[in-house]
Amino acid sequence: MAKRAHHTLLLLCTMALLLLTVVSPSTGLSLDTVRDFLTREEDTIVFSLIERAKYPLNRPAYDPVHFGAGAGQRLNASFAELFIRESEAVQSKSGRYQSLQEIPFFAHRVPFALAPPYNFTRELYLAAASVNVNDAIWSMYFSELLPVLTKNGDDGNYAVTVDSDLACLQALSRRINYGRYVAEVKFRDDQQTYTSLIQAKDRDALMKLLTSEAQEDVVKKRVEKKAIVFGQNVTLDGPIETGVNNTNQANFKIDPSVVYKLYDQWVIPLTKEVEVEYLLHRLD
Amino acid sequence: MAKRAHHTLLLLCTMALLLLTVVSPSTGLSLDTVRDFLTREEDTIVFSLIERAKYPLNRPAYDPVHFGAGAGQRLNASFAELFIRESEAVQSKSGRYQSLQEIPFFAHRVPFALAPPYNFTRELYLAAASVNVNDAIWSMYFSELLPVLTKNGDDGNYAVTVDSDLACLQALSRRINYGRYVAEVKFRDDQQTYTSLIQAKDRDALMKLLTSEAQEDVVKKRVEKKAIVFGQNVTLDGPIETGVNNTNQANFKIDPSVVYKLYDQWVIPLTKEVEVEYLLHRLD
């Protein structure tokens, strides 16, 4: 009886929160804050890639069918997938996905039982807020990026390895799906133009409007430089102003051109895909 | 019946593995590999601190008593502790602690049900291998380091925040408890001297023998420099050789002197404590 009353209360609170979300005006989102966020996320992405590259490929962690330690126990999913599912379940229970900036790779409907409550301001248009390309990020990461990021080999550190995969995936997901915030800001800045293109469902024109090749070029060169600066072996030789002692590529922890390519071929195009999808739902 | 047979088999395998461990000679451990490991871990520690500092302190995550989202649900542990316990349980199940390099903050006796099997070579003396100072690291991290590492504030991102605490704690734990490997190498290099000091239980003499102030000084200055290089805001201005564009401290993501102090007051002393403890059990 007390339990039912408790559930009703919880439901009411949730509804009130949702209502508040729809009614309350969004604040704090501007082209500057959005750009600052994306620039800061570059560091997170580069750090996470460098950390993943500490370990060799560790292929057994990714076999789509593998045998657990209890031998004979055949599991129809890779160790990586099982690990990420279980980790995301803990994080979901802990309220990670209360923030719309975070989107899980596997849907979780766990009520957040652990987390202290917090009333997030919602800056996105609700009907479009769930737009994401996590499936594309997942497959790009494992099929395209990992093989060029890591050295071949197997050191058995599967849990630590896959934990660092998860850190990379979360950073990439946050950055790429942040396209929703970018699109929201751009929409608000020029509602008239966007509204007519959205009503005409003109994907190509939207994509063109969202594209700034000069800006994209700056971003790609900057992340490549970050890979150089953060991936160097820092020693006490040389003045402290000189961050890069040696630009010989063999001395870097990850290949800077891989990071350039990651942004050129996947991060930027996928972000724009998110932007277009978000806009197409912006008037729903 | 089949289940019991299965358990017996598992037990036998575990025993065989342990036996193999005791018998097989350790390889690959030298003063050079140990030093390389420790130097590389510095980068991991600095990255993890920079990532934690992205978020404000978020104090409600650390309240020793807090109320879960289900309101009225009083929990006698901080959110941080609950989150880390649950995350470690997943990692334990995934075999993370099969590698002696990793030590959980909360003991877990979960059999690793997810992980593909791997036969680790054990480089430590088994009777001393479980020596660790995780309790000291835990309390130092939350009481001393967090308040000076983060800005005051509360953005509600408790799960992401505490997830990045866990990354810091794991990096610090791996680095500090690696003192066991350092001690093992030093012991093997000079068995006679160490054996007599261990038999005499002469902690002070052991500590003195393990201390190299010149080397410690290099390490402290190097991690401070890493905090500068990795914590700067990288821009495309200036030549690529110049990693640090601006040594104005306000531009760094974390205060480099905090990292110096972290190593000076905690990482190095705690590592030596681990070394001494390990040695005192090296002849058990």
Image (spheres, coloured by chain):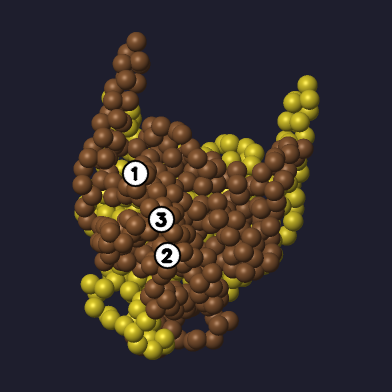
Chain colours: A brown, B yellow
Q: Is residue A27 left or right of residue B51?
A: left
Mark 3 near mark 2, Cβ–Cβ under 8 Å? Answer: yes
Residue, x 70% and y 41% (percent of image)?
A: A76
Nearer to me, A61 or A54: A61
Q: Dot 1 falls on which chain?
A: A
From this view, report whether residue B64 is shown above or below residue B165: above
Q: Which residue is mark 1?
A: A126
The answer to whether tags 1 and 3 share a subunit is yes
Mark 1 near mark 3, Cβ–Cβ under 8 Å? Answer: no
Q: Dot 2 falls on which chain?
A: A
Residue, x 73% and y 37% (percent of image)?
A: A73
Residue B194 x, y percent position in the rendering:
56, 64
Q: Dot 3 falls on which chain?
A: A
Per the model, the C-alpha gap separating discs 1 and 2 is 24 Å
Q: Badge 2: few (under 14), some or many (20 or more) residues near its Cα, within 10 Å?
A: some
**Amino acid at dot 2:** Ala
From this view, report whether residue B48 is shown above or below residue A126: below
Residue, x 39% and y 66% (percent of image)?
A: A210
Point out which mark residue A205 bears: 2
Quadrant where the image shows the N terminus of chain A: top left
**Amino acid at dot 3:** Ala
